[in-house]
Image (cartoon, grey):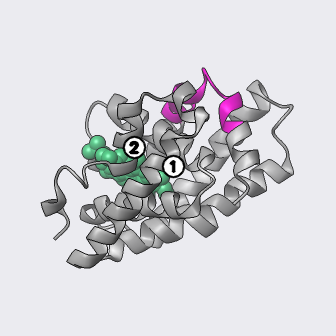
Amino acid sequence: MSTELIGESWDKLAGQQEAMVLTFYERLFEQHPNYKSLFPESMSRQMEKIVKTLAFVARVNAPEIVHARLLKLGYKHRKFNLKREDFLNFKRVFLEVLGEYSSEHCPEVWNEACLQAWQNAFDDQIIPYLAQGLEQRMTHSEKMRIINMQTGAGNQLLAMPVWHEMLSEEEVWQAITGTLLRSPQTFN
Ligand code: HEM
């Protein structure tokens, strides 16, 4: 995954990311009205989580960390009964809106290579690992493996200066561990 291109284009949208994610959800619900009832009335928390997740995927140049996070995120989506098609719809609308915002606000970094890098991130990383997490029935040892991986990854991440510019230490741990460490019983 070309994290440089993705990270650079995402950073360039600083100040526009929330508005972009809002437009994304409006467009998603316009084109797929059946999705709306899955989401809560107020989308502000959801938008914040999406922005942070994308910043995470865009910035962490360590596949095992990103994969663990995506597996767990996919697992959280299992109750919505999603199919591959739904993830492809998400990707299509997301890239459309990202392209519109980037062309307007940071045309200097938005080009064919950058779009391709985002497409590859969805096709090769985000969707396959979310889908795998969606289908996963984790055994105890798998849960432990992810926890261990995340703990090691957390220490590595905290050593990276970029995180201190973007997130507090607590937020880094929240991003990495999510609810897994706090409530492993949800992973039955
Ligand atoms: C393909 C990429 C996708 C990404 C990166 C993504 C990301 C996320 C994230 C970060 C959360 C917050 C999880 C948390 O609470 O910690 C979330 C929740 C959620 N996602 Fe997705 N998602 C994707 C696809 C989808 C699709 C296709 C649907 C359904 C149409 C969907 C429906 C939901 C719903 C309903 C929630 C819970 C909202 C709430 O109750 O707050 N997601 N997603």
- As drawn, the label of residue 175 is 2
Q: Residue furthest left?
A: 185
Which of the 4 image quarters holds residue 83? bottom left
Q: CA distance from mark 1 to mark 2?
A: 14 Å
Point out the stretch of residues depicted in magenta.
9-23
Q: Residue at x 47, y 38 (%)?
A: 52
**Residue 16: within the magenta?**
yes
In the image, what residue type sits under mark 1? Gln
- What residue do we see at 60% from left, 60% from top? 122
Determine crowd level at label 1: few under 14, some 14-19, many 20+ residues with C-alpha closer than 10 A: few
**For the residue with label 1, is its CB less than 8 Å from the closest atom of ligand 1?**
no
Closer-to-camera residue (25/33):
25
The quadrant in which the C terminus is found is: bottom left
Asked if labels 2 and 1 touch by Cβ distance under 8 angstroms, the answer is: no
Q: Does residue 1 sit above or below 33 in this rendering?
A: below
Name which residue type carries label 2: Ala
Q: Circle 1 sits in a helix, a strand or a loop, which is it?
A: helix
Q: Position of residue 148 (x, y in %)?
A: 35, 63
> Quick check: 33 left or right of 128?
left
Prevailing secondary structure of the magenta residues: helix
Q: Residue furthest top?
A: 15
Q: Which quadrant of the figure contains the N terminus?
A: bottom right
Up/down of 169 relative to 80, above or below:
above
Q: Nearer the viewer, residue 12 or 166?
A: 166
Quarter of the view holding residue 169: top left
Asked whether residue 25 is in view, the answer is: no
